[in-house]
Every structure is written in C-alpha cells, then in structure tokens.
Amino acid sequence: MDLRIQELVEFTQKKFGLSNYYLHEQQFYRSVDIFNETIYTLSMEWFPNDAVQDDDGLNPEGTVSFEINLKSLKFERIFAKGKPYAEDGITFSNLNKEAVIKWVECETGLSYGEQFQWVREDEGELNFMSCFDGVAVSPPGYIDIKFNEEGKLTMFSMHGEFPSKELIKKEKYTLSLDRLEDLGKEQLKLIEYPSYEQKKLYPIYALEEIFVTNEGTTTIPFEVFADENYFLKIDQTIYWDEPMNQPFERKEIKWIEDLTAEQAFSCEPSPDSFPITEIEQEKCMIAVKNLLRREYPSESGNWVLKHCYRDKGYIHVTLKANIQDVRVFQRKIKVFIDPKSFQVVNYMDSKPMLETFNDFQAPDKVTITKEEAYEKLKDLFELKSYYVYDFKQKQYVLCGKLDCKYGVNASNGEVIALDDL
C-alpha cells in the first residue's frame, strides 16, 4: 500500500476508534467543482474484525464508510450500516443541537451562522445549508447529520459549496418586490402540473423562480445550477436530409474511474476541467446528429441541442424538443459521448417517464387569464436574499430569489399551495 494512503488509513482508524475493524477496500474518486478545481477524495470501507462480505456482495452489519478530501484532509462522509461502528466512537452529549453544531465546526473548520446554518430537524437528524453571514448561497452546500437514540453518530455528509469571504462581493441589499413587478408578470407561466394521487393534470399559473442581481437590472436563471457542472450553451436546432439505417448499439457507461495514488496526491487536473473546444463542439454536433438520424429518423428540426459539459470522463449533451407542451416536466434527451472517439456511447430519453401522464385525466379548460392570476398571487410572491455565484465575475454576487410557493388553478381561479400537488 502507498505510504501516503497508509498514513490516512492509520489516521482514520485512530480518530474514529476502529481498533476492532479492518480496512476492506479503498478507492480514489475525483470531481470538478464550480470553480473548475479538481477535488480528490479517498473512500474507505471498514468491516468489523469478525465480519465478512456476504455471498451476494452486500456489506456486513456494522460496516462503516469514510470519504476524506485529500486537499483539506477533512472527512466529507461517514456512514455506518446498522449498529454504531465503535463503542468509543463519536457521541453527542444530551442529544442537543448545540453539541452537534460544535462538532461540525470542529470537524469542518466552518463557523456556524457565518458559513452554515440550521434548516431542519427531525428525530435523530439535523440538516444544515451553506450561507455567508446568514445569507443563503447558490449553488448551495449541505451538511446532514444522523445519530441513534444514544447520541452515537451514524451518518455525516458534507457536499456542495461553502464559499470563503474572499469569493464574496459584499454590498448592501436594496432589492424589493415593488421594483420587480414587470419581472413577476414575465415569470408567471401556465403549466400543467400532475397530481399523482388523483391521476389528473391541473392547469396552474405558477411563478418560474429566478435570481435578480441587487441592482435589479440583471437576472440569473435558476436552471444554471440544475446540472452539477457549468455547461457550454449552444441552443442550435439540428436538421438532416436523410436518415441513417445503421442500428445504434448502446454501450455500458463506466461511471467510476481507475485512479492512481500519484494522480490523486499530485492533484492531477481531471479531463472534466478542460474546456470544450470549438472543434470538439463540432464533433459532438455530428455525433448527436447521426444518433438522431438513426433513432429518430423522421424528426429533423424537432430537436435543439441546448448545452454540453464534461462529467465522469464523458461529454454530456442535452437535447430538448423544439416544440414543448406546457407540462412541468419537459421532453429531453441526454446523450453521452466518448471524448476520444467522439462516438455516442449511450443516451436517455425522458419520453417513457412522460408517457405515464397519458393515463392521467386531462386538465380542465382554462378560464382565468394570466393578468387575473397575477393579481391573485402578487401578494404571495417571495424575495429572499442570496449570494449567487457569477461564472463571469468568478465570485458570489448579492441577488434576490424571486419565488412563490403558491399557484392559481387556471380552470377555477383557486389559489393553491404547489406542494399540495
């Protein structure tokens, strides 16, 4: 075993009281954050000394897993299967929130109230999210803690972004709802919401959430952070003259990379961190067009290549139907391309999922206008301050998130909570 791995193994064993455990396996993982930095983690699985892996490959009772960030040497994930992993493991006295917060501060190096804040508490579970001086950030970071009735830690997970003050563009918050009346009207959309309980589609006027910069002149679409990676926007409709008769053969996607200790400890940049060049973009266009010619031969002009990005060693391309209906879930295709051969490896179409709504009762006739719906909802609009990462400025800028938890049933004018659907 590499000496550097051995040191981390011994550090973990001592820190968490794993004297009655043995290391079953370890593996390196890497990811690229929103700052385009490659993050390496070492994942470890520890088995109790008297346990072995089941014949079906399932880990035995008492298995505990760890993930440690190789740059910060902070643990980002701890998970115990079943019983507590060690008699002298992490225990929170009196099961109080303050004890948990103090442990999180010590373990992560973050300050409560300044970089993370409490958002939810259930029995045996606490959830936190990232912030800056109490202001939420986007994209967010999450910290989740679980413990048993004795207060012993059974799960800890930290992921996402917890920005330092150097990345924050501080300013006084000045936005107000009365300045955003036109934007509120623009963001109000008529959408068919599905009710799975009633097996029915409802025509609902709902506000499409959006970020507005503090000066009120620039917006940042919420969908920018829908994917974990920042993507290259293309927005090009794909046409072809003739279909291709060659059948497409799907290949299995390999999500886990084989990484060496040298790559990990030297922080070798991931291929996912490299920009997609114009030549690569053109090759992706050709690959996607050929896929469509094979699998969707009669649908020339029906698909728009929205964006592409790198992730897990592949180039991911998102296509959306040129003509969309007004349902909350839209038709799209995700294509996975090998960046070496520029051949499509596999793809996923949302059509099978959308077809489940074919058996739903059709929406009632719309009788309410958008203007009438706006008047019913405008006093329920919410504007919450956020620090949002701006990819152009490469820092977090102060914004307001325009949102609304309610909608208007377009068939009868009833104001309803969207969560009830």
Image (cartoon, grey):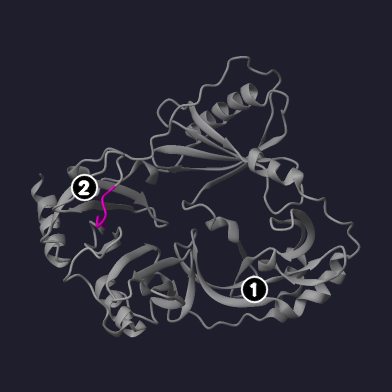
| 1 or 2: tag closer to the N-terminus | 2
* Residue 26 placement (x, y as % from top left): 21, 47
Question: Magenta segment, which residues?
Answer: 59-66
* Residue 25 placement (x, y as % from top left): 20, 46
Q: What residue does disc 1 label?
A: 216
SS at circle 1: loop
| Closer to us: 169 or 266 | 266
| Closer to us: 137 or 366 | 366
Vertical side of 360 occupied by 177: above or below: below
Crowd class of label 1 (few under 14; some 14 to 19; many from 20; radius 10 Å) = some
Q: Residue at x 35, y 63 (%)?
A: 157
* Prevailing secondary structure of the magenta residues: loop
Q: Which mark is residue 352?
A: none
Q: Residue furthest left?
A: 3
Vertical side of 180 occupied by 334: above or below: above
> In 3D space, how far apart are the residues under numbered discs 1 and 2 (Cα atoms)?
49 Å
Relative placement, left or right, of 108 versus 384 is left
Between circles 1 and 2, the one closer to the viewer is 2
Q: What residue does disc 2 label?
A: 26
Crowd class of label 2 (few under 14; some 14 to 19; many from 20; radius 10 Å) = some
Amino acid at pointer 2: Gln
Relative placement, left or right, of 157 versus 364 is left
Amino acid at pointer 1: Gly
Relative placement, left or right, of 107 versus 338 is left
Image quarter (top left, top right, bottom left or bottom right) of the N terminus = top left
* Residue 259 placement (x, y as % from top left): 25, 40
Q: Quadrant of residue 319?
A: top right
SS at circle 2: strand
Q: Residue at x 37, y 74 (%)?
A: 165
